[in-house]
């Protein structure tokens, strides 16, 4: 095909790609995982919302409770952070709940709460920062004096 052939082709406007219709056709009802926390039942979404994924990335460098609030709203609906905090939810419990919830959305019934707790412990152990090089070097050595002779 030459440039002239391309120029003389009939250029009809392309048809709009309708992803709304496509996704509606592709959607198959997945079982939605319910959970109970502080006497209330929550039902997780069919799939992991992109907002949850984005907020999880942002949380790694954030101290803003509103980032946590938005992430929780994406999974559980409403503003549950303050409600759960008032009920005494700890950061460890929240971490376990989030790990379990993300796994339950992907594959309902496949990850136990115990396994989520193990994964949280592994993740927490990996995050524990050791002393940096300067801090290690600044420690005074408590070695006993030596005569230099081998025993």
Image: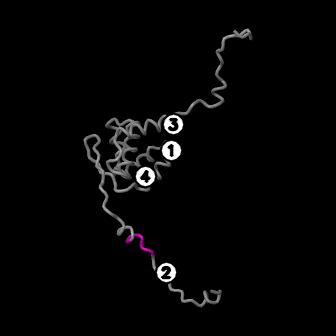
Residue at 62%, 31% in the rendered image: 132
Q: CA distance from mark 2 to mark 1?
A: 42 Å
Do the residues bearing badges 4 and 2 touch, measured as CB atoms within 8 Å?
no
Residue 86 placement (x, y as % from top left): 33, 37
Q: Main secondary structure of the magenta part?
A: helix
Q: Secondary structure at mark 4?
A: helix
Of residues 145 and 34, which is closer to you in this image? Answer: 145
Decide: few, some or many residues near mark 2? Use Cα within 10 Å; few <14, some 14-19, many ≥20. Answer: few
Q: Real-space Cα distance between discs 3 and 4?
A: 22 Å
**Where 129 falls versus 70 (above or below)?**
above
Q: Earlier in the sequence, mark 3 or mark 4?
A: 4
Q: Is residue 141 left or right of residue 68?
A: right
Q: Quadrant of residue 142?
A: top right
Quarter residue 2 falls in: bottom right
Return the disc, 3 or 1, that comes first in the chain's sequence.
1
Give how far across and how far down residue 59 sits, in percent.
Answer: 48, 45
Task: State the extent of the magenta-drawn residues as a range.
Answer: 17-21
Dot 3 lies on which element?
Answer: helix
Secondary structure category for the residue under label 2: loop
Label number found at residue 126? 3
Reading the image, the residue beneath label 2 is 14
Marked residue nearer the N-terminal end (1 or 4):
4
Q: Which residue is mark 1?
A: 60
Q: Is residue 98 left or right of residue 1?
A: left
- On residue 52, the disc is 4
């Amino acid at each position: 095909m030459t440039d002239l052939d391309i120029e003389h082709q009939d250029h009809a406007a392309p048809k709009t790609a309708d992803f709304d219709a496509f996704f509606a056709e592709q959607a198959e009802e997945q079982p939605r995982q319910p959970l109970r926390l502080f006497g209330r039942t929550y039902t997780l979404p069919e799939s992991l919302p992109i907002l949850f994924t984005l907020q999880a990335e942002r949380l790694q460098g954030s101290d803003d409770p509103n980032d946590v609030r938005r992430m929780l709203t994406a999974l559980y609906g409403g503003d549950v952070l303050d409600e759960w905090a008032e009920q005494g939810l700890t950061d460890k419990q929240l971490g376990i709940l989030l790990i379990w919830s993300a796994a339950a959305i992907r594959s309902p019934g496949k990850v136990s709460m115990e396994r989520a707790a193990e994964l949280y412990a592994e993740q927490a152990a990996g995050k524990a920062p050791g002393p940096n090089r300067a801090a290690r070097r600044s420690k005074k050595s408590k070695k006993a004096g030596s005569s230099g002779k081998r025993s």
